[in-house]
Image: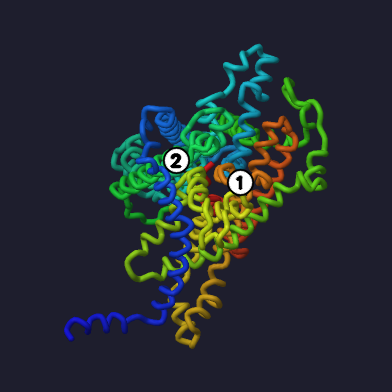
Amino acid sequence: MTITAPKLRNRSSLTSSDRFVFLLAAPVVLVLLVYIVVPMFATAATSAEGSGSAYNGFFNGSSGTALGLSVGISVGSVLTTGILGTILAVLLSRFDFPGRRILRLFALLPMALPPLIGAVSFYFLYAESGILPRFLARYLGADAAAVSANGVWGVLLVHTMTMYPYFYLAVASALAGSDASMEEAALNLGASRFRMWRTVLLPMLTPALVSGTLLTFMVSMASFTAPQFYNVQTLTMQIVASRTSGAYDVAAAQAVVLSVVSIFFLLSMRWYENRRIHRGASKGTPQAVKVLHGVLPRTAAGVGSLLVVLFLMAPPATIALLSFTVDGSWTTQILPPDYTLGNFTRIFTDPVTLRPILVSAQMSFAAMLAGILVGVLAAWVVTRWKGPGKGLLDVMVMLPWALPGTVIGVNIVTAFATPGPFNLGQVLIGSLWILPVAYFVRFLPLVFRSANASLAQIDPGVEEAARNLGAGPWRTLRTVTVPLMSRGILAGALMAFIQGFGEYVASVVVYPARYAPLSVEIYNRIYSNEFGTAAAYGTLQMVLILAVLVIAQRLETPRRARKPRGEGPAGAEPSLTRVMAPTPT
C-alpha cells in the first residue's frame, strides 16, 4: 500500500494538457530518431566495420592531413572574419560619415549570396584566370599568378568575404545594446579610452564574439564549394572523394571524425561562454553616434565606403554579367566578348535546361512541408514539455545544424541504402526522394528555431483561457497557438525552402544521376565551359533569394512597426538579417 500510493498520485496528477504534450511528443521523437539519430549511428557502425580498419593510419595519412588543413583554414577564417567583421561593426555602429547608410546595407550583401555562386564569383574575379588578375597583367604588367588568390589563400578570401557578417551582426547588435553610461563612468574615473574598451566593452562583447567564432568555425569546417573550386583537399573534399570511389567505410570514418571535431568545438565554445558571463547594471542610456568632422576624415570615410561597396558588389555583379555571355566564347579575354539573352530564353523554353530548377523547387518544397509539420510540433513540445529530456529533444532537433552537409549526406546514404519501414520498403538511394529527405534533415532546425522564437512570445495564459472556455488541447493548438505563431512559421519555412533550393554540399553526395538539382547543374555547367548558362542559373537563384528575404522582412516587421522614413537607433539592423540564418557552405 505504501509503495503503490505515490505512483497512483503521480499518474492522477497528469492533466489533459500534459497527456496531449506526450501524445504529440511520441511521433516527433520517432521522426527525429529515424531521420537524425539513427543515420548518425548507422554511419558510426559502418565506419567500425572490419574491426575499424578504416581508422588505421587515419591521422598519419591523407585524411589526417586533410583534417589538419580543415582545422587550420577554419582557425584562419575565424581570425580574418573576426577582424573584418568587428572593425566594420564598430565603424558603422559608432561613427557617422558620408556613405554610412549605404555601406550598412551592402555590408549584409554576402548573406544573400548562395554559397556555390559566391565561390564561383570569387573564382572568376580573383583566380589566376579571373578578371582582376588578367586586367592587372594586361595593363600594369603584373604577374597574374602572383596577384591572384589560389589554393588556401583563395579559400580564405572566399571565407573572409562571405562569413564576416557572422561577426558583424553579433558585434553590431551587442554595441547597440550596450549602456553608454557605463563607458562615460569609466572615462570619468580616469580610464583611458583603450582601457575602457579593454575592461568594459570587450567583456560585454564576449557572447557576440563567441557566437561569431562558433558560427564561422563550424561553417568553415563544413565548407565544400570554396575548397572544391580552389582544389584544396580538406576533409569534406576527402569524404566526397572516398564516397565517389566506393570506399564507404573510409567515408564513414572521415564523417565521424569531422562530426566529433565539430561537436567538440561547439561544446567547448558553449562551456567557455558560460564561464565568462558578463552582465552590466544598465540604466538603458542609449548610445550616441559620433559624427566625423573635418574635410579630410569625411572625405577619407566617403572614399573608403565607396571602395568597400564596390568590393562587396563585385561578386554578384560578375555573376549577373556572365549570365549574358555566349557559352564557350570567354577564353583568354579580360571580359567576355559576346553577350546574349539566349541563356535565360533557353532555361525557360528547353525542358531539359529547365529541369534542374523544377527538381530543386519541388524537392525543397516537399522538404519544407515536412519541416513545417515536424518543426512546429517539435517547437511546441519543447516549449510545453515539463518533464526531463527537454534539453535532449532540443539538441536532437538542432544536431543537423552542427554537422557539415557532407556528413548529413553520408549519414542518409548509409541509413537508407536498404529497404525499411521508414522508407516504405523502397531503396531511396538513386531515387529522387532522397533529396527531400536530405533537405528536410538539414533545414528542419530553421523552421524549429523560427517557430520556437514565435512561441516564446506567446503568453501561455492565452492557451489557458481558450481551454477554460471549453476548447480541447488540439483545438487550442489549431485555432489559437498556430495562428499566433504563423509569422514565425512562415519566415522559417521560407528560409528552409530557399536554403533547400540552393543546397549543394549534401546534394552532391546523394543526388540521382538523372535528376541533378540546380546547384549540382551549375557546377556541371561550369566544368563543361558553359559559363553563361551556369551564371544565368545563379542570377535567377540570387533574385529568388532576394525576393524571399524581402518577404521574410515583411513577415517579421508588422506594418505598424515600420518607420516611414529615417533610420532606426544606432546599430539597429534590418529585420531580414535576423531570419537569414548562417548556412554551412
Residue on which disc 1 sits: 511
> Within 10 Å of the Cα at label 2, are there few (<14), some (14-19), or many (20+) other Cα atoms?
many
Q: Is residue 236 left or right of residue 99?
A: left
Q: Of helix, strand and loop, which one carries label 2? A: helix
Residue on which disc 2 sits: 249
Residue 190 location (% of width, % of height): 29, 38
Q: Is residue 195 above or below residue 356?
A: above
Q: Quadrant of the C terminus?
A: top right
As shown in the figure, which amino acid type bears the numbered disc 2? Asp
Q: Residue at x 61, y 45 (%)?
A: 112
Can you see residue 137?
yes
Which marked residue is nearer to the observer: mark 1 or mark 2? Answer: 2
Residue 476 location (% of width, % of height): 51, 79
Q: Quadrant of the N terminus?
A: bottom left
As shown in the figure, which amino acid type bears the numbered disc 1? Tyr
Q: Is residue 390 above or below residue 163?
A: below
Q: Residue at x 32, y 66 (%)?
A: 388
Q: Is residue 434 left or right of residue 473?
A: right
Looking at the image, what colour scheme do you see?
A: rainbow
Q: CA distance from mark 1 to mark 2?
A: 20 Å
> Within 10 Å of the Cα at label 1, are there few (<14), some (14-19), or many (20+) other Cα atoms?
many
Q: Is residue 217 above or below residue 418?
A: above
Q: Nearer the viewer, residue 173 or 110?
A: 110
Q: Of helix, strand and loop, which one carries label 1? A: loop
Which residue sits furthest left?
2
